[in-house]
Amino acid sequence: MPSFVYAKGAEWATRRKVYFSGSTALVKGTGLCFDGDYYSSATGEAVTDPCDLRRGVVTLPDSSVNREFAGVVTQNYLARTSGQEVEIWECGGLAQISTGVDTTVDSTLLTCSASSADAGRFTKSGLAGRGTALALETDASGSLFESLDGSATTAWVDPSCTITKTGIGTASTAGDRVVILGGADDAYGGDATLGEMATKGIYTIVTAPTADTITIATDIGDVDVALYVIPAAEHTVLAYLYDGKESGLQEYISPQDAVAISAMAGGVTFICAGYTMAANSTYVLADETNDERRKVFVCLGALGTSDYVVTVTSGMQKDGSTALATATFDAAQEEVTLEWLGSYGGATAGVWVELAGAGYTAGS
């Protein structure tokens, strides 16, 4: 028999010590972003000072830092009110990442979340680049259950909130956790509080009393929600952390009756749905200053009566001649991918160009 020859695989990502400015506990594999404003806001460091520490402080992802991905923490850290030094794996190598989806080796792409519900966890794939990873192992327990189209419903009867969706009880057990990504109630649903918004977060499942229900101990509103269920114990998967351009991460937003609901600059915005609105919810997509930045919108379910309407300040449809003034979403899997082009050499003129789109209504 031929002798076994060991072939070295990909390099593990570089480890680096950084300062975490938050006070929360961190789970191994959680994604973090650079907090470039920390030394200006917290210590008074002038922005005119050449402060290299602006790439030495990190924070949990959100819409203000989603294009500043730093890496993932190499171990668990307990909460500390004054912040703490942590170690991260940087982009461009192998790392263990915290997940919320099942994975298939060398196939599944996962992007770090910038949503408040699950900030730093790698779930649905977004754009390629920093903040996106390729799974290097098959894992069938990243997510026990998923319902993103808004067809899951909640109802509070003290002391329990019951969440109803076909099969959720069968997939879950007491101690597992349900992640509420967003949602709202129907504007015409007859609830005492019309336009009530879901309280996002991670909640421990108290019971799974039937095949189609689970209960938690927190009133998150009587709403239609997007959610997924993860095991009680945290776990990670081996992945390759992409380097290069910023992916911009991904987020979930919930349109609201006659209210402007912001989306983060860059990255992928998933639009929660499953409910009815009496009037449009809106957002204005501002012009960029750097070319080749991308923005994606994806609607996850049906919005009844009214829509989520994105006004594109400067836009062009993919035919290259028709203006793109608005992008309207009200059904599952409607989506658009835009890229900002034209700000070369400091030029102020530019345009959001539609690269691809499906189902959404383009207004000119």
Image (spheres, rainbow, N blue to C red):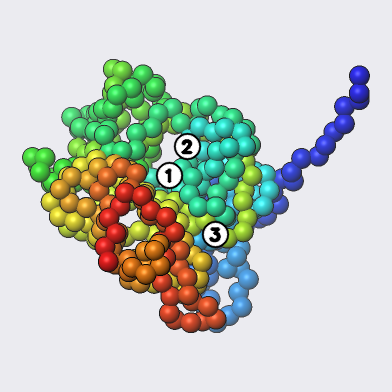
Please identify, in this view, whether the residue under mark 3 or under mark 2 is nearer the observer.
Answer: 3
What amino acid is labelled 3 in the image?
Glu
Residue depicted at 18% across the width and 29% down the height: 157
Tell me the number on the disc at residue 100.
2
| Residue 38 seen in the current view | no
Q: Which residue is mark 3?
A: 246
Residues at marks 2 and 1, CA–CA distance in whole angstroms: 9 Å
Amino acid at dot 2: Gly
Amino acid at dot 1: Asp
Dot 3 or dot 1, earlier in sequence: 1
Q: Which residue is mark 1?
A: 118
**Vertical arrangement, residue 217 with respect to residue 280, above or below:** above
Q: Residue 16: where, in percent of width, then height?
A: 68, 54
Dots 3, 1 in contact, CB < 8 A: no
| 2 and 1 marks in contact (CB < 8 Å) | yes
Q: Residue at 39% across / 23% down in the picture?
A: 172
Residue 341, horizontal then vertical, whole percent: 47, 70
